[in-house]
Amino acid sequence: MAFDIEMIKKVYANMPTRIEAARKALGRPLTLAEKILYSHLDAHTPLTDYPRGSSYVDFNPDRVAMQDATAQMALLQFMQAGRPKVAVPSTVHCDHLITAKSGAKVDLPFGNAESKEVFDFLGSVSNKYGIGFWKPGAGIIHQVVLENYAFPGGMMIGTDSHTVNAGGLGMIAIGVGGADACDVMAGLPWELKMPKLIGVKLTGKLSGWASAKDIILKVAGILTVKGGTDKVIEYFGEGAISLSCTGKGTICNMGAEVGATTSTFGYDASMSRYLSATGRADVAALADGIKEHLTGDSEVYADPKKYFDEVIEINLSELEPYVNGPFTPDLATPISKLKEVATANGWPMKIEAGLIGSCTNSSYEDISRAVSLAKQVSAKGLKSKAEFMINPGSEQIRYTIERDGFLDVFNEV
């Protein structure tokens, strides 16, 4: 962490001046996405108003994250760069090569044995070049990044499409290929087409059974699987502020399902609380010091249609739970109409299995909601007919849900 905090201090020290220069160059207020993008322009890239959706621009991301399946080729390429250490903080996370089948006590030893050569290679290369190495069993890459490395106003790339999860902590976090990660680790600028901007204004407050996940399920129904391509989705409004940090992460994570370059939220109290709860109160204090630069300008949110290429408005007070699918993630059906629509379309009516977890819905908050439901089921003397699997997003979450008795509740259902 010591190295990271110095990096964050440097980013925050430069950010106000760079944002002001960008505001002056563009001659208008800036969205949050623009503040982060323009404050991360490569030093040799002219500061000008780059047309969205057509201009290719060079950036300097703050950090890189790689999962085990994609890190192999990226690190093999990096080893040819001739550098003694990576140019930016980088991490490798061993999670994708572990198959979830029979439970952690069986699956983890099997995964370790099956992919031992890969894990040994990744560990030794990481040790040699100053890369953080998260061994098998530590957790899902995106949850581990959110808990340990993501920070408001930062820019990162990762070799996985759901790198965008870090937008829940106010980052511009983008999924890339291994060659892009190699370039950034080698100290080269990273090229990106200047994205168009979609503004999602959230009003009201979630109630009843509705959760943060239902927001992105509804957005997916509006945008379709291609509606976010080459675009950044920026959420704002009173409804956005009312969401938890991990709820924001879920929304950003699933933005990948509409093809979005990334999604993000402005810095607020929920992010500050999450940083403190995950042992990063020092980062929260730094962010509090420049918080006006970690969200879009007020003029932007007052008249969003003037500054975004597209604007969507959702009243959270009226939002009900959604079920998306089958067959495509943009087929969004409100729960009140699910039986009617499923019957009309001949969808399978029997639920045979469910997953509580994954990198999208595996926070303590997500699992606590499922536990609340499980307690109600047990209180009524009911038993689950469908199989369900529990997949905490990280070892930290597994430890805390076991500590608080959540696993015992699930075992009783």
Image (cartoon, grey):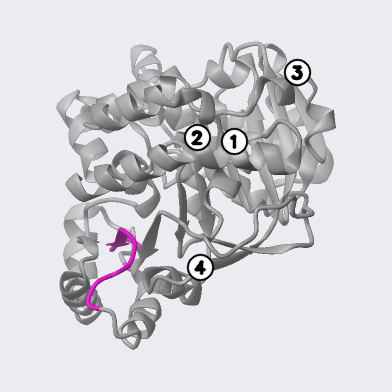
Disc 1, disc 3: CB below 8 Å? no
Residue 376's spot in the image, x, y percent? 39, 15
234, 183: nearer the viewer: 183
What is the CA distance from the residue labelled 3 to the residue labelled 4? 34 Å
Q: Which amino acid does label 2 sit on?
A: Pro
Q: Which residue, given by chain and number where applicable, does mark 4 sit on? A: 189
Q: What residue type is labelled 4?
A: Pro
Disc 3, disc 4: CB below 8 Å? no
Q: Which residue, given by chain and number where applicable, does mark 3 sit on? A: 302
Residue 398's spot in the image, x, y percent? 23, 39
Residue 254's spot in the image, x, y percent? 58, 44
Foreground disc of the pair 3, 4: 4
Disc 1, disc 2: CB below 8 Å? yes
Q: Earlier in the sequence, mark 3 or mark 4?
A: 4
Q: Which residue, given by chain and number where applicable, does mark 2 sit on? A: 16
Q: Which residue, given by chain and number where applicable, does mark 1 sit on? A: 20
Q: Which of marks 1 and 3 is nearer the N terminus?
A: 1
Instruction: Tell me the crowding category of disc 4: few under 14, some 14 to 19, or many 20 or more residues within 10 angstroms, Cα based.
Output: many
What is the CA distance from the residue labelled 2 to the residue labelled 3? 22 Å
- Marking on residue 249: none
Q: How many marks?
A: 4
What is the CA distance from the residue labelled 1 to the residue labelled 3? 20 Å
